[in-house]
Image (spheres, rainbow, N blue to C red):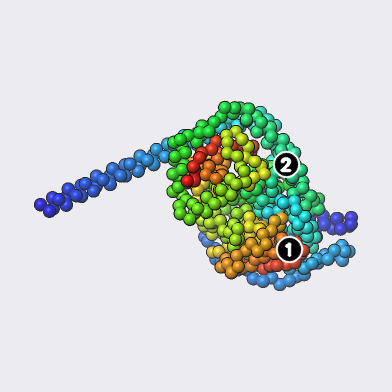
Amino acid sequence: MRSIRLLNLALIFAVGGIWTVNGVLAQGEQAPPPPATAEAAKPQAATLPASSGVKLPSPVVLPMREGSVKIAVIGDTGSGKPEQFEVGRMLNTYQIAFPFDSVLMVGDNIYGPEKAHDMKAKFEDAYQSMLDKGVKFYASLGNHDGSNQRFYQHFNMNGEEYYKLEKGGVSFYALNSNYMDKRQLEWFTTRLAEDTNKWKIAFFHHPPFSSGKFHGSDESLRKVLHPIFVKHGVDVVFTGHDHFYERIKPQDGITYFVAGSSGQLRKGGVKKNSPLTAAAFDQDMTFMLVEIAGDELHFQALTRTGQTIDSGVIKRRGA
Amino acid sequence: MWHVRICYSAIVIFLLCAVSAAAQSSSSNKNQGEAAEFEQRAREYVRMREGIEGQMPKLPKAATAEQIEAHKSELLKRVLAARTGATQGQIFTPAASAMIRSIIATEFKGRQREDLKKEVFEIAAQGVPVAVNVEYPESKEMLEVPATLLLALPQLPKQLRYRLVGTYLLLVDRENNLIIDFMPNALP
């Protein structure tokens, strides 16, 4: 067991990467880039070391290139239910084979009260193994999240409701979709205009595009954010709020994901035959693994039991 | 004679347009004036609250859950003590409420209004209290304020939030969840 822990730590440090929070880059505006496509990835079948004694239910189909940016995405997690913990354990298992060092959280991080024992029961305990390995969780706020979560040490928000972080030439923008006011929009558009990184990814709670029967697309947010994303070259958007997994067909070249079933599930929650859907799954809880290498973003969505229910590659819009 | 009648008609139409434009401009100026006063009263609350928070130990940006909980409780206690006697309408004055009501009515019409009403009544049904100097319960969901509406409403200081609950629009302190004022019939 000790050798496995040492191997995990070595993998974390080997991947490396530097995060800055609220970093500012000076750059002029970019012309809208051409649309991207999502294609099926060829399985590389990353496996665990034989000595680990652990078997992956389905192989990692991501390219596992050296120096690539490796992250996971989870959403609507903070229920404290056994299923959340099962997702956490499976995520930890896959982290050994696919050594991501960061997890993006798309909101509803904690349901109900947010006292100290709630933070432990609905977050820390579910992901303790990864926290112990130094995996960083970067949260955005959902409609069940209090603003004070931005101070919580394990959410790495640095006291801000919305922030930017960078890793390996990729800009990640965490937004607060509960309260998309002028101040936040000015901050966001200014940062985007100055951003020299080729990849721009946004993550937040409410989905501008969703085939959910219960919530569905947030059209007010779409009206405000989607033109900004198009204009400033945002490539991919991760959201939650609807409790299922959905990959949306590219919208003006932007791929939106609904990744809101890592702690809650609405079975049958996706409208069938929605014109928005490229892929959807609403029968079990899910999480995502994402690898950004060069001009390609590879993704794999897995269930609580480790079954792969979607995968593909998205080419960067400006490539 | 007909050309004289046409001239007189043109003058009358011009005068009517001018009066209408002046009335709209006056109304718009009045709204701007009320919005500015509303924003000023909101800032006064924030100044008071910042003064209180400035006397407390600063909350670290990477705090433990215990530190956050303690800070929030203490801030709430001190602000409540400073606001004894606060009543409804001190920030949402009748004039400000009328202005905001008209903004919301303009922004949300027809089906959009019905959809929003359905959502706000779901929140109301969860038992969120609507009263001044009461905490918005931490366990209760907060309805997202539609982005297009936020762009139309008077801008608040970053420490404050609009919240829709049933037919009420609340003003809530984002750090201690205190409802500092509310207005009824925001969404008729």
Mark drawn on residue A179: none
Q: Tell me which chain the residue with mark 1 is part of.
A: A
Residue topped by disc 2: A115
Which of A179 and A168 lies nearest the eye of the viewer? Answer: A179
Q: Earlier in the sequence, mark 2 or mark 1?
A: 2
Residues beneath discs 2 and 1 located on the same chain: yes
Mark 2: which amino acid? Lys
Determine the residue positioned at 85% across, 63% down: A54
Residue A271 at x, y percent in the picture: 60, 65
Q: Quadrant of residue A17?
A: bottom right
Residue B62 at x, y percent in the picture: 71, 42
Mark 1: which amino acid? Thr
Q: Tell me which chain the residue with mark 2 is part of.
A: A
Q: Quadrant of residue A92?
A: bottom right
Determine the secondary structure under disc 2.
loop
| A91 sits left or right of B11 in the view | right
Q: Is residue B47 above or below residue A295?
A: above
Residue topped by disc 1: A303
Which of B40 and A219 lies nearest the eye of the viewer? Answer: A219
